[in-house]
Image (cartoon, rainbow, N blue to C red):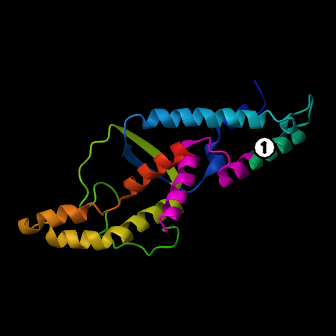
């Protein structure tokens, strides 16, 4: 067994420490496509680790082995942070969510939503949808919070209008039209998954 095998088992602590778990429904086949992408990325990681500079000489001292391991850890962390190596779903989705927020112009600070804002579950105005698969990812907590705040502040005017109209049967057609403008964290995660699978 190669000396770097423990890296295969303990990658999570190298990636993120303060994380928030987020789950969302996704279309059929998404989990299989993500698994295929992870297989490609892990094969790439194995190629990177096969680089001669990471080879530990026979009879190397414990200090030398520890030094090389530290260099490998640092190198892999730099690649992950730069998005050049996305060998876990969490790293892949972190970069995809950041890119999705940037493309929408949402990659900035947002004020905290009011305590009445939904934290999870179905948001007012969103239609029930039974997704055939679910994925769960761990995003850095600051990114997960930015995602939530951006969705809330972007959708808040629409949600306020929906609250006014929801009980008025005469406004139902307008309600449905406006309700389609509500953007949830799940919507952004599904778009980020699509982005990650096309890059």
> Residue 23 location in percent, x, y?
41, 48
Q: Residue furthest left?
A: 169
> Residue 111 location in percent, x, y?
44, 75
| Closer-to-camera residue (75/198) | 198
Q: Residue furthest bottom?
A: 111
| Closer-to-camera residue (18/197) | 197
Q: Answer with the quarter of the image where residue 73 lies.
A: top right
Whether the magenta-drawn stretch holds residue 78 is answered as yes
Dominant SS of magenta comes to helix
Q: Residue at x 87, y 33 (%)?
A: 56
Secondary structure at badge 1 equals helix
Left or right, residue 34 beside residue 17: left
Q: How many marks?
A: 1
> Residue 133 location in percent, x, y?
37, 38
Q: Residue at x 92, y 34 (%)?
A: 60
Position of 181 relative to 50 (above/below): below
Left or right, residue 24 beside residue 19: left
Left or right, residue 187 beside residue 145: left
Q: Which residue is mark 1?
A: 72
Tell me, yes or no, if residue 162 can be seen here: yes
Task: State the quadrant of the N terminus.
Answer: top right
Over which residues does the magenta segment extend?
A: 76-105
> Residue 10 location in percent, x, y?
65, 39
Q: Residue at x 26, y 57 (%)?
A: 126
């Amino acid at each position: 067994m190669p000396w770097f095998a423990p890296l295969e088992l303990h990658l999570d602590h190298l990636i993120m420490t303060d994380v928030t778990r987020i789950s969302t429904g996704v279309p059929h086949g998404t989990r299989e496509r993500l698994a295929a992408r992870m297989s490609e990325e892990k094969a790439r990681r194995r190629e990177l680790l096969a680089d001669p500079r990471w080879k530990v000489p026979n009879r190397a001292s414990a200090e030398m082995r520890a030094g090389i391991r530290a260099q490998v850890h640092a190198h892999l962390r730099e690649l992950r942070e730069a998005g050049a190596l996305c060998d876990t779903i969490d790293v892949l989705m972190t970069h995809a969510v950041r890119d999705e927020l940037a493309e929408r112009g949402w990659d900035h600070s947002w004020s905290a939503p009011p305590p009445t804002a939904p934290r999870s579950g179905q948001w007012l105005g969103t239609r029930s949808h039974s997704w055939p698969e679910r994925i769960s990812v761990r995003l850095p907590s600051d990114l997960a919070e930015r995602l939530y705040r951006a969705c809330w502040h972007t959708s808040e005017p629409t949600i306020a209008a929906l609250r006014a109209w929801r009980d008025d049967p005469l406004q139902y057609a307008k309600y449905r039209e406006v309700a389609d403008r509500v953007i949830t964290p799940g919507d952004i995660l599904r778009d980020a998954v699509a982005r990650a699978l096309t890059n």
